[in-house]
Amino acid sequence: MQMQLQKVFERPRTLRPVATHYCPGCGHGIVARLIAEVIDEFGIREKTVGVAPVGCSVLLYNYLDIDMYEAAHGRAPAVATGCKRVHPDLVVFTYQGDGDFASIGTAEAVHAAARGERITTIFINNAIYGMTGGQMAPTTLIGQKTTTSPYGRTAEQAGFPIRMAELLATLDGASFIARVSVHSPKNIIQAKGAIKKAFSVQMNQQGYSMVEVLSQCPTDWRMSPAEAVKWVEEKMIPYYPLKTLKAP
Amino acid sequence: MEKTFMTGNEAIAEAAIQAGCRHFFGYPITPQSEIPEYMSKRLPKMGGVYLQAESEVAAINMLFGAAGTGARVMTSSSSPGISLMQEGISYIAAARLPCVIVNIMRGGPGLGGIQPSQSDYFQATKGGGHGDYHLIVLAPHTLQEAVYLTMNSFDLADKYRNPVMILGDGYMGQMMEPVSFPKLTPRHTPKGWALTGAKDRPANLVKTLYLDPEALEKHNLVINQTIQKIKKEEVQVETYHTDDAEIIIAAYGTVARIAKTAIEVLRNKGLKVGLIRPITVFPFPCKIFEELADRRFLVVEMSFGQMLEDVQLSLGRKASVHFYGRTGVVPSYDEIIVEVEKLVK
Ligand SMILES: Cc1ncc(C[n+]2csc(CCOP(=O)(O)OP(=O)(O)O)c2C)c(N)n1
């Protein structure tokens, strides 16, 4: 008797068959896969353009088999705007870290959202500057130790971490804003749902969409992957609550 | 050909439209705001896009995005805004994206003033942002010439996959003159590298990061070979009464125009004075200076001596080079006459 093997899981067409450069336990690779799955499920690989700026995000084009730009630090929403304004028929998204989106690129982030630019931002909040080796980010939590807040971040010295989702949700041009995480299978499934919704909002011409993804960075948090997952649950989520802040 | 009476800023904007530019991203700043204003009036009516960016930083990155799709795109600004664009210009040059950037120069450094100036010459011709690259820099001296050069700038950018700068000054931006627009069929350059969605072809990538040192050098060599080709093939220069000239004025843009008036007066007085006027300030017309290195030179600029260095380099150490510069103020032809007369005394 011959056994019938049913395929229940495979690599998305949009995900290139390569190993990533991400550290063990990092959330970036998970999100890259989710984006690839969403692109495949919508069947939009041939009309999707991504923009990945400086940071651990930057090599996303090595993993996604779509047309992509590499952008300067913080400028992805402006680059995406230029692309989308020339080709309104394309699906254009940016993939940005927290230093990128919430610090050096806040002007571009806020104004792309305020204009209701028909683009989608996937915003990886790992509360740290990953690529440059673990310096303090605008999203670093109070008390969190980084290489440039070696005694722990204090509000007196460095101010408060920014909640980008809440901030952008105040803007009329922002249509869909959600915060998700990728620290557990359940959360990963929810994250995919939010990314899918964000893309559909763009395709339905409903304005700007942004999904903030809380993402673990064991290497720069100086933790094991298991500890990092716990830290997301216990420290990050209380300050950055997971929810859909705005939907059309 | 029919002539239209318009400001330099409007003439440049219209020339860009006629060259096929349908997308403009900018941010207001005096003395060039008539360019974005003109674009905001015209482009939406012809199916194009005018977008006011939140800053020059954003504007130049929107240009990066739009140029990356292969579209003919332009931005314009004036000195402080152009400084803010330098990061993006460096990325555009690195990614080899064709586009046109207009700098209607005003006084600096800092906020400077809104008067005409030529003090961004170093920034325009030597790279401006970080890294090994050059812009092709075109410096018109009349509005009609601004029209021709702007119309041609898009073809040049496409041909070399290199950004082009139109380098004007506040005087040129604000003054009015009759100009005509020759019929132009924009050259169609295939852009297989453009990002338009990976349909029926492998995915394209617009990038500037080369972590492998050898790969970076290889990429920079391609840029450099392009620059060397531009130096060889794209030099434009006007010589004016240089054949018998004992004294040659070197000037570009508005100052060259003023110098021409001074030269008329001086020639009527019997003085043999000529002019070399670089039209491309990058690539710089070194050769014509070398050929005429036995004459005496007076470099005149609206700066304290920036093009002067290129003239000196071209002429060599033994040449006789004098300089007259005003910054913040436009030199009058009388002042130039006085400077030339000092030399013959
Ligand atoms: C203008 C500029 N400033 C600084 C840097 C250096 N730099 C590279 S990545 C980075 C931080 C990235 O952190 P983040 O955006 O949080 O992304 P992550 O790497 O954590 O995913 C910095 C500061 C740069 N490339 N460009």
Image (cartoon, coloured by chain):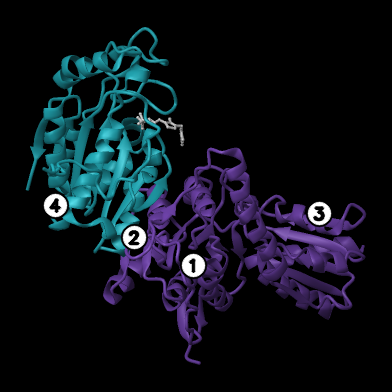
Chain colours: A cyan, B purple
Viewer-closest of A185 and B152: A185
Disc 2 or disc 4, which is closer to the eye? 2
What type is the residue that disc 1 sits on? Gln
What type is the residue that disc 4 sits on? Ser
Subunit under mark 3: B
Whole-angstrom CA distance, mark 1 to mark 2, is: 44 Å
Picture quadrant of residue A84? bottom left
Whole-angstrom CA distance, mark 4 to mark 1, is: 47 Å
| Ligand 1 rendered quadrant | top left
Q: Residue at x 26, y 56 (%)?
A: A45
Secondary structure beneath dot 4 equals helix
- Residue marked by disc 2: B198
Whole-angstrom CA distance, mark 3 to mark 4, is: 59 Å
Q: Earlier in the sequence, mark 3 or mark 1?
A: 1
Asked if residue A133 shows in the view, the reply is: yes
Rendered location of residue A167, percent (x, y): 19, 34
Disc 4 or disc 1, which is closer to the eye? 4
- Residue marked by disc 1: B174
Q: Tag on residue A200?
A: 4
